[in-house]
Image (tube, rainbow, N blue to C red):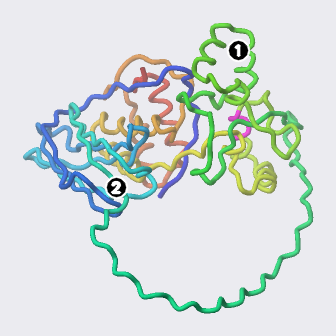
Amino acid sequence: MKFTIALIFLFLIFPVSYVIAHGEVNDFSTDKKIYHKNDQLNISGNVEFDSNVPFVTIQIFTPGKSGFADFKTFPIGSDGKFSAVFHVGGPTWTAEGNYPIKVTYNGNIEKTIQYKEFAVQKEQESVPEPEVQQEPAPEPEVQQEPAPEPEVQQEPVPEPEVQQEPVPEPEVQTRQESNFITLKFKIPNFPSFDKPPQYYIDRYNNEQSYKKWFDSQFPNDSIVEVVGYKATKVADFPSFDKPPQYYIDRYNNEQSYKKWFDSQFPNDSIYNVLGYKNPIAVPDWIRNNAEWWAIGEINDSTFVSGIEFMLENDIIRISSISPSGNVSDDEIPSWIRNNAHWWSQDLISEDEFVNSLKFLIQNRVITVN
């Protein structure tokens, strides 16, 4: 099952790192050096086995470590040996090139494989016989549907607090992800979901140090192009005075608002219109990790690796984090383990589970430096 989670995770300038304990890995190898689409990638290796850490974590990065091609945990035998199988190709294998593989178990070892989508054909295909030129069959007549009458752009009656929404939208992310271009999150979590565009524009206009920093990061773009909203066919929507989270919350919590938005923007998501990419689907292995961690099959550091993965890839976003501390078994409340188990069994919602992760980070049980 795949699903999306969106919470706010605010860091304007500095990237985050995570303090996580791991184990010690001796070595690993792959069965080939070059792989093609639909190949099977086999990895084997050995570690200094610790019975308290029965799993090894394997991450496969895209070229330049711009993202993840795959990320899984695998069990380790009592002799310290492990093996893993990955499927090569698919939407996360974004380009041909060198794919770094990192194996983590109280330390890291990294090696690289090469990915080429198709194998080079060494033999020339036989020359085909000349084709017989046949007269083209007449094209069937296309029955044109009558043009629909123009829709009336009416916004649902909003709550008493708002009636109109003004704003230029950020880089619009359409549902066709491959064609979507945005300046949002070029710097991790900037601009934030919980700050309106006007907040950043005012800082840019009134703080010289902030203006200098912004111009150094975006020398070819204006502050409005980066943090603002692009104009839409609906007048004054969205508004520079309202943060993205305001619109996201209304869309998720008000059926009338959702119905209105979908009627006006049938080919875009609420995130697209606000200029952000759609949240990334949570991998299935995260649910497995939650269950194994809840029943004590994997340790805290392995579970936190999954949280790290989701934070780094914007699968979840958490705001107002005060760094400090470390991961401690004694500090993790039992109800969080219960939530992990219930979520893995579909007994609570994804939002309730992510609120547990939010509690761990905001209360410095898990450190974000």
- Picture coordinates of residue 304 (x, y %)? 36, 35
- Using the image, tell me which numbered label, if any, was put on residue 116: 2
Residue visible at 38% across and 45% down in the picture: 290
Instruction: Determine crowd level at label 1: few under 14, some 14-19, many 20+ residues with C-alpha closer than 10 A.
Output: few
Is 278 left or right of 267, judged from the image as shown?
Answer: left
State which mark lies toward you, 1 or 2: 2
Residue visible at 49% across and 18% down in the picture: 322
- Picture coordinates of residue 33 (x, y %)? 22, 51
Residue type at numbered disc 2 = Lys
**N-terminal of the two: label 1 or label 2?**
2
Is residue 355 inside the magenta stretch?
no
- Using the image, tell me which numbered label, if any, was put on residue 203: 1
Is 66 left or right of 204, judged from the image as shown?
Answer: left
- Using the image, tell me which numbered label, if any, was put on residue 132: none
Q: CA distance from mark 1 to mark 2?
A: 46 Å
Which secondary structure dominates the residues rendered in magenta? helix
Which of 160/265 is in front? 265
Whether residue 296 appears in this view of the structure is no
Residue visible at 11% across and 44% down in the picture: 80
Residue type at numbered disc 1 = Arg
| Residues in magenta, as a range | 244-248
Instruction: Determine crowd level at label 2: few under 14, some 14-19, many 20+ residues with C-alpha closer than 10 A.
Output: some
Whether residue 34 appears in this view of the structure is yes
